[in-house]
Amino acid sequence: MIKRSDINSVAINEIVHKVKIKINESVEELRNSCIELNLLNVKNHKTFNDEEIRLRKSIERNKIEINNLEKLKLDIDKDKEEVEILLKESENENISLKNQHKEVQFTGNLLNERFNELEEAKKSIENKLNCVSNNFNESLHYQKVLADKYKKYLGLTIYKIKENTLKFSFQHLKMPCYIIMSFVNDPLIIESEPKVDLNYLNNVFVTEKKIVKFLKLVRSEFIKSLK
């Protein structure tokens, strides 16, 4: 007969409280140290577009895998319930059926083995499901952090106009300002509003290794043109 162990709960309030205190102490330091980020270098391989495509494909794959794992987990839970019922039925067999004793005992052992296999398979799938869910959440968090940093430090919002074409819109100026970059063209920067020297910006983009510095320079050019 298989006995199911009770799951004891662990008190974690004190640990959570200490972690919150530690996090609060680190927030100000993190805010002061994250002003300039070493973001994506789109010069060589047009990383903006490639990273977006990679993340979207990864997210879609993760969604499909999560759905498949959830379905498999439900099937295993169902099998487990059926095995438990069969085990219970085998345990309650009429002891007067001596001729069937060996067969019932053998069946019970097989069911026990199957039950243990299902338990292990369930744990493995639950771990994998947690891993896939964490990767999915990290991908979403990465995209949100990237957009928030641009908006906070440069007043910048990035829009996808069409495939391989992005619009970088700068806010908090005297008027809406933007540049449009097509990653299948040469030069990359094909339009700006207000009008600025696109040849100059394209040359800077080729020579400047840090995208944040390049975007700061673009914003400075807009400020000059609005004076």
Image (tube, rainbow, N blue to C red):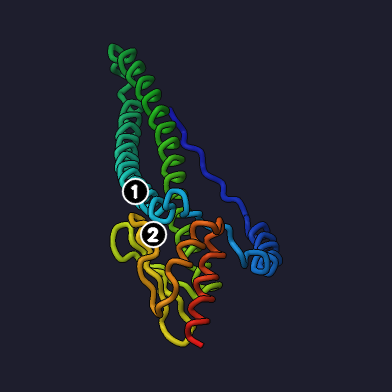
Residue 165 placement, left or right of 148: left
Question: Closest to the observer: 147 or 216?
Answer: 216
Q: Residue at x 48, y 61 (%)?
A: 203
Residue 54 lies, in percent from the top left, at 38, 48
Query: Where 151 sits versus 42, above or below?
Result: below
Label 1 vs 2, first from the N-terminus: 1
Q: Nearer the viewer, mark 1 or mark 2?
A: 2
Question: Of the numbered discs in the image, which one, if any, rests on residue 162?
Answer: none
Name the image quarter holding residue 157: bottom left
Q: Residue at x 49, y 57 (%)?
A: 206
Quadrant location of the N terminus in the rendered image: top left
Inter-mark Cα distance, 1 to 2: 28 Å
Q: Which residue is mark 2?
A: 187
Name the image quarter holding residue 210: bottom right
Residue 85 lies, in percent from the top left, at 31, 34
Q: Which residue is mark 1?
A: 57
Residue 28 placement, left or right of 191: right
Question: Closest to the observer: 108 or 161?
Answer: 161
Q: Residue at x 66, y 63 (%)?
A: 23
Query: Where 123 sits versus 63, above or below?
Result: above
10 Å crowding of disc 2: few (<14), some (14-19), many (20+):
some
In terms of secondary structure, where does tag 1 sit?
A: helix
Residue 140 lies, in percent from the top left, at 43, 57
What amino acid is labelled 1 in the image?
A: Lys
Query: Where 72 sits versus 10, above or below?
Result: above
In terms of secondary structure, where does tag 2 sit?
A: loop
10 Å crowding of disc 1: few (<14), some (14-19), many (20+):
few
Residue 218 lies, in percent from the top left, at 50, 71
Q: Residue at x 41, y 82 (%)?
A: 176
What amino acid is labelled 2 in the image?
A: Pro
Question: Closest to the observer: 221 or 64?
Answer: 221
Total count of labels: 2
